[in-house]
Amino acid sequence: MTNVLPDLSEPQGFSFRLEAVSEQAHPRLHPQEVDSTDSAAAQNRDVRELMLDELEQFVVAADERTFRARQVMGWLWQRGADSFEAMSDLSAEFRAQLRNHFRISEIPAASVAKSSDGTRKLLVALADGEAIESVIIPAGSRVTLCLSSQAGCAMACEFCATARMGLHRNLTAAEIIGQIAAARRELESGEQLTNYVFMGMGEPLANYPRLTRALSIMTSEWGMGISPRRVTVSTVGLVPAMERLLAEFPSVNLAVSLHATTDELRDRLAPINQRYPLKRLIEACRGLPIKRRDRVTFEYVMLAGINDSADDARRLVRLLGQLKAKVNLIIFNPFPGARFAPSTRAAVEGFQAILRQGNLTATIRESRGQDIGAACGQLYAERQSG
Ligand code: SAH
């Protein structure tokens, strides 16, 4: 069992380093300073990484009117332009300036596996040879996209396939959002993405600056215009980042991966618990600015003989009793080399019944896309050659 504390160099102290990170990520954008050779163009910043105010700074420095920035964003995010040339209501001169300073990243290539239940798993190829997985999950009138936030993961949860990869690297905001464009390309006619969940590879809150940049682009009216209520960020419980996320994005849904009701067990299943133990995690959840009628979702992976007893269920009721919470029971999805087995149906239903008696809303998450290795916790992308 891997009982080591995961490397937390990223989330730790992130709030103090955020400025430094964003400083680095926003080189000064002055039109006069950049030449237009091909090699310069190749290194240009991806305009799909920009926030509106950053593009506005550039536009003003280029002696254009501020509203041109919104026009460019409209072309990028609403009209799907893939070149500055296509932005036909901008002057040729301004388009040339844009071209000299920025590039527009392409929609990443993806190979697709289709499950018999309609689930589609995309293996998305990144420019440096890394690969990540995204999953399209149709269910009734909803079509949910499960997004990755990192290539691999450093959180070392014992029952998760992605953890086996370790952390390869953080995704950029453009790479996070690129998954949406890649997924849209795979939709059938008449099909539309309705919900977005960060439950793919990686710990989203360990990639805070890039996650929140992506969330801003997704949910802003100048960006993709997705309602934040249709977006869920799932975290293993990085407490400071969790609090900060809800302060900055109060309408985004939060899901917390709990999996255990004692520190002893959670230390082992999700070693981040050694840093943010249950008491601290639950207290933080209690203090979150959750709006009326909204609730925090707690995910609980059901592992046979490990965390699925009646005692566990009763402890869970006590733990979450005072909270605006709902529980999502996930039946463990095995993968090659996994050291756990899924709880029996009877155990899961018995567990659910105890939660309900304790006045907790508890749903059982049906596994989707198991036949293509697309189910929760099965995502494991082999590094592509290159
Ligand atoms: N790092 C984030 C998001 C990615 S995992 C988090 O921990 O929440 C998304 C969900 O899948 C988590 O609740 C995780 O515990 C669960 N999961 C991981 N491995 C699983 C497996 N093998 N079977 C079922 N669910 C699993």
Image (tube, rainbow, N blue to C red):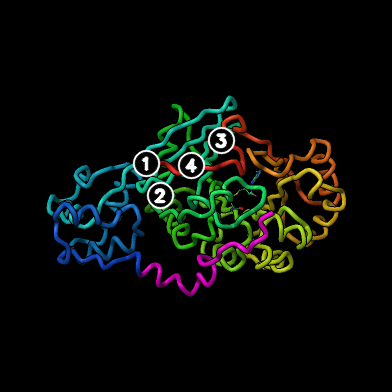
Q: Quadrant of the N terminus?
A: bottom right
User: Which residue is nearer to you in this view: 89 or 318?
Assistant: 318
The residue sitting at the bottom extreme is: 16
Q: Position of residue 195 (x, y in %)?
A: 54, 43
Q: Which residue is mark 1?
A: 108
Disc 1 versus disc 4: nearer the observer: 4
Check disc 4 and report the residue beneath it. Answer: 382
Element class at badge 4: loop
Label 1, label 2: how far apart the Cα atoms are: 8 Å
In the rendered image, residue 314 lying in the magenta stretch gets the answer no
Which quarter of the picture shows residue 66? bottom left
Name the mark nearer the viewer: 1 or 3: 1
Q: Amino acid at mark 4?
A: Glu
From this view, report whether residue 371 is shown above or below residue 356: above
Return the residue at label 2: 175
**In the structure shown, which secondary structural element does the residue marked by tag 3 occupy?**
strand
Q: Nearer the viewer, residue 10 or 256?
A: 10
Amino acid type, callout 1: Pro
Q: Is residue 295 visible?
A: no
Q: Is the CB–ligand 1 distance for label 1 below 8 Å?
A: no
- Amino acid residing under circle 2: Glu
The residue that appears at 55% across and 65% down in the rendered structure is 8
- Tell me how many marks there are: 4
Q: CA distance from mark 2 to mark 3?
A: 20 Å
Q: Which residues are magenta?
A: 1-23
